[in-house]
Amino acid sequence: MVMTATHATTLSPAAAILWAYVFAEDGTPQSIPGAEVDAALATRDGWFWIHTALADTRCRIWLEQNAPASPVAREILLGPDEHLRLDVTADAIAGVLPDLQRDLTQASMEFGRFRFAMTQRVLITARRHPLHSVELTRRSVEGGAQFPTAASLLDGIMDHFADAMGRLAVNLGDELDVVEDRVLRDDLSDERQRVARARLQIVRVHRQVAQIRVLFHRLEPRIVVSHAALAAPLGALIQKFDALEHDFGSLKERSRDLQDEVATKMTAITNRRLFTLSILTACLLPPTLVTGIFGMNTKDLPFQQEDGGTWYALGLCVLAGALAYWALRRLRAL
């Protein structure tokens, strides 16, 4: 009987929950096994953070059937839409927000989405891929960080995301500094590819930051009215994303100017090489004409019967090239 019960519990949808915590009034967290989440929601005080993986069918079943969320929140949690959104009602907030995907040890440069539904008593988050900011927040919870409300934990996730964007802005700025120094020294090798890669990353990140900034600004009045506890942290986040949007906007303009400067430098280098090639061609044309004449194999060619005729012919070639060079200098083509 015990083995049967354990097996049934393991196969229950709630058992697939990645992690769950219950927080006391002072924000102290306590981990809850996934299989016990439903019972804890029904019997325990405090507020809950429940994190699920949308790639797991059991998690999707739990979100559809057991999650303490409204139909609109369930639709957002389970939906395929990747566009950023926030839906605000009188007693809940649900939405789709950006985060960096995470590989085995650190954040990658690929963006993902984390979906959430939040009430005063529960914060449900869902993702398709491991996410950087969500993982850092979990580690903070495991380290004893206190989150007295669900809003404070959601603010912590977005704060980690803003910090990651800030570090990325610094790294991209450093990359542009290196390229700019080499461009000013005319020490060009792969700068065109480097600045193109940096600009691509800047444009992608700027697009995400600008979207979330606009989203927060547009919904700020409604959130402040219906969820007063979010007013202060939301205001701080808006300031952070305003600064980030300005930083990435500046990097975007700088990368575009630098890309134009690199293209100008490369064009100048190409023009110099073509000019050198043109001068060599112009100087070699008269000697080529001389050698062509002596190669006609017709009668009465000069120097055929004279000793040292070949050297006379070579002298004519050199003289013809020198005259062409003198003419180009005279015409100020050099």
Image: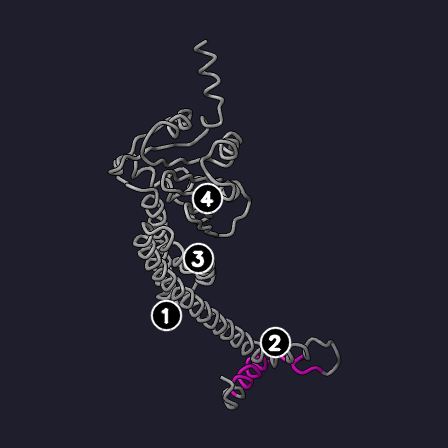
Residue placed at 39% from the left, 64% from the top? 251
Look at the numbered disc 4 and give the secondary structure of its residue: strand
Does the residue at mark 3 contact the one at mark 2 (Cβ under 8 Å)? Answer: no
Dot 4 or dot 1: first in sequence order is: 4
Disc 1: which residue: 184
Q: Earlier in the sequence, mark 2 or mark 1?
A: 1
Q: Which numbered mark, 3 or 2, is in the foreground of this view?
A: 3
Q: Nearer the viewer, residue 273 or 95?
A: 95
Q: Which residues are magenta?
A: 301-326
For label 3, count other residues whose C-alpha is less than 10 Å away and answer few (under 14), some (14-19) or many (20+). some
| Percent of width and height locating residue 112 | 46, 46
Quarter holding residue 145: top left
As measured in the structure, the alpha-carbon distance from the residue carrying label 4 to the one carrying label 2 is: 86 Å
Q: How is the image coloured?
A: one colour
The residue indicated by pointer 2 is: 310
Residue 215's disc is 3
C-alpha span from label 4 to label 3: 15 Å
